[in-house]
Image (cartoon, rainbow, N blue to C red):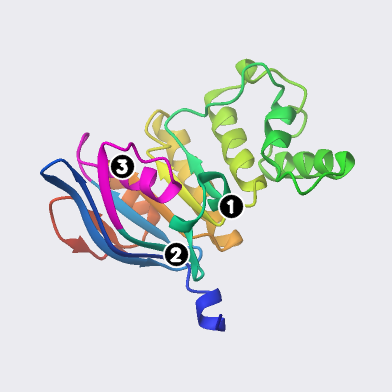
Amino acid sequence: MSEREKTNGLCLTDVVIRLRASQLIALTAVVPPGSVFTVMGPSGSGKSTLLSFIGGFLDPAFHAEGAVTVDGLDLLALAPEQRRAGILFQDPLLFPHMSVGANIAFAIPAEIADRQMRRRMAAEILTEMELDGVSDRDPATLSGGQKARVALARVLVSQPRLLLLDEPFSKLDMALRSQMRALVFARARKAGLPVVLVTHDEADADAAGGPVHRLGGQDLGHG
């Protein structure tokens, strides 16, 4: 593998997704490390379907074709759990029966078996998210903004190859939405992660600053 292939980020090549006779997605895109590719469209247009295809959990009712690689690695040849696609949804989806710290530790890759190291990694990411002192708390006691940051911390500690964002800011109030956009995109840049964001909010696309693909329309540059 060449150095270029090791650093070329996420490549979506001739990706086509259909549901029966309807073509929902048709795109080719390169998402460099740390940048955001935004897919916009109304509800039901197929935005989340694209993330399902990349992540490996596309409903078999859909027909999909094309190539998806990250740094030259063929993601479609891997089982979903091997793709290491970090996903953030509209809801934080924290495990209610686990403490905040246990939620984080659960996502740490299994090959990091040392218990002390896992605890230290969980504590460090919580500190980075400005969540000191919440490790032992029940997730239900957290504010909406805190839950969103825990969800992001859990994704980052899983050592993902890429981030898939399924309208993760849509349920936050305006102030929190702006804060979380800035935090997520800054963390992706710092970690060198290519990001695919699906949204119907123009402000999300503006904050992401990368190219925008509008379903049913043309690709538009942004920023």
Q: Observer-nearest residue: 154 or 73?
A: 73
Secondary structure at badge 3 equals helix
Q: Earlier in the sequence, mark 3 or mark 2?
A: 3
- Pointers 3 and 1 in contact (C-beta within 8 Å): no
Q: Observer-nearest residue: 77 or 187?
A: 77
Q: Residues within 10 Å of mark 1 (few under 14, many from 20)?
A: some
Q: Which residue is mark 2?
A: 69
Residue at screen point 73% across, 20% down = 137
Residue at screen point 53% across, 74% down = 7
Q: Which residue is mark 3?
A: 49
Q: Earlier in the sequence, mark 2 or mark 1?
A: 2
Residue at screen point 39% across, 55% down = 208
Secondary structure at badge 2 equals strand
Q: Residues within 10 Å of mark 3 (few under 14, many from 20)?
A: many
Give, as a three-letter code, the residue at label 3.
Answer: Thr
Q: Earlier in the sequence, mark 3 or mark 1?
A: 3
- Indicate whether residue 143 is drawn in magenta: no
Secondary structure at badge 1 equals loop
- Indicate whether residue 58 is drawn in magenta: yes
Disc 3 to disc 2, C-alpha distance: 17 Å
Q: Is residue 105 left or right of residue 19?
A: right
Q: Residues within 10 Å of mark 2 (few under 14, many from 20)?
A: some
Residue 172 screen position, x and y as percent: 43, 30
Which segment did they paint magenta?
Answer: 41-65
Q: Nearer the viewer, mark 2 or mark 1?
A: 2
Residue at screen point 28% across, 43% down = 47
Residue 28 screen position, x and y as percent: 28, 65
Q: Which residue is mark 1?
A: 160
Disc 2 to disc 1, C-alpha distance: 14 Å
